[in-house]
Image: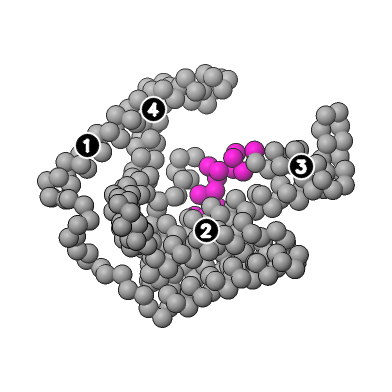
Amino acid sequence: MLKDITLGQFFPGKTVIHRLDPRTKLLILILYIVALFLAKSYLSYALMLVFLVTVTLLGHIPFKSMTRGLKPMLIFILFTAVLNLFYTKSGRLLFEWKFIHIYSGGVRTAFFMVLRILLLICGTFLLTYTTSPIALTDALERLLNPLKKLHVPVHELAMMMCIALRFIPTLIEETDKIISAQKARGADFETGNLLRRAKALVPILVPLFVSAFRRADELATAMECRCYHGGDGRTRLKVLRYAKLDYLAFLIGLALLAAVIVLRHFGL
């Protein structure tokens, strides 16, 4: 299950999506999320799905990686679907048994909620799959640059995000190694009730936290030895510049949002 977590991974490439400015991709993701939460009909969600599939194909991202990354979220998605299915009391009554009542509105709400979560997660995956953590850090810092006038530590926030994304695969790999080592020593993580399984995780969490703090200390020492002092006077190897392709992609994102708003307004 741990190996199925693909958030934070970067697949290098030279596709149209990879060549976009990371600031453009961040802004398009924001427009995509806003459009996703404004979508209310089957046609709107179909439009969002077509957009997501098109971007995935243009980025040459294998669908297997997308579906593999969704596996750890299945329990959360199913729990959300069940809550919306049983607690939405609108529309026709479809099923009734004792205290269980299922309405047509509940089925529709559960379906849209699951679809919204899936599209949201996949859209976020596409950003990390096609953009390196360093590029994301630079883009976030440039976009939040006006907040420096309000004394917001923009560079520090961007650096924290970069480090977090960078170490997600590393911590997952470390956790997998610890689990394998504990199983080799006779540990059992798959049998027993929920409380017993939770207690069995203690031998994993302790060395994992120790390893994470050790890595953080080593990273801080390495940055200090290289005289790292933050964003003041810092130069970049690759300077971010917008190209015609970025303006075109941003217009497509705006068109997607406008289309969803129009569909919502006319109830289509």
Q: Which residue is mark 1?
A: 217
**What percent of the width, then of the height, locates residue 138?**
31, 60
Q: Which mark is residue 205?
A: 4
Q: Quadrant of residue 85?
A: top right
**What percent of the width, then of the height, locates residue 36?**
60, 59
Quarter of the figure with the C terminus? bottom right
**What percent of the width, then of the height, locates residue 30?**
50, 60
Q: Give, as a single range, the part of the protein colored magenta.
A: 61-79
Q: Secondary structure at mark 4?
A: helix
**What percent of the width, then of the height, locates residue 166?**
33, 49
* Separation of residues labelled 3 and 4 (CA atoms): 38 Å
What residue do we see at 12% from left, 50% from top? Answer: 227
Q: Secondary structure at mark 3?
A: loop
* Separation of residues labelled 1 and 3 (CA atoms): 49 Å
| Majority secondary structure of magenta residues | helix
Based on the picture, tell me whether residue 65 belongs to the magenta stretch: yes
Q: Secondary structure at mark 2?
A: helix
Q: Which residue is mark 2?
A: 123
Q: Nearer the viewer, mark 1 or mark 4?
A: 1
Question: Is residue 141 visible to us here?
Answer: no
Labels 1 and 4: the sequence-earlier one: 4
Q: Quadrant of residue 44?
A: bottom right
Q: Which residue is mark 3?
A: 88
Labels 4 and 2: the sequence-earlier one: 2
Q: Nearer the viewer, mark 3 or mark 2?
A: 3
Please indicate whether residue 128 sits to the left or right of residue 227 in the image: right
Q: How many marks?
A: 4
Question: Is residue 244 visible to us here?
Answer: yes
Three-letter amino acid code at disc 4?
Answer: Leu
Mark 4: give few (<14), some (14-19) or many (20+) Cα within 10 Å.
some
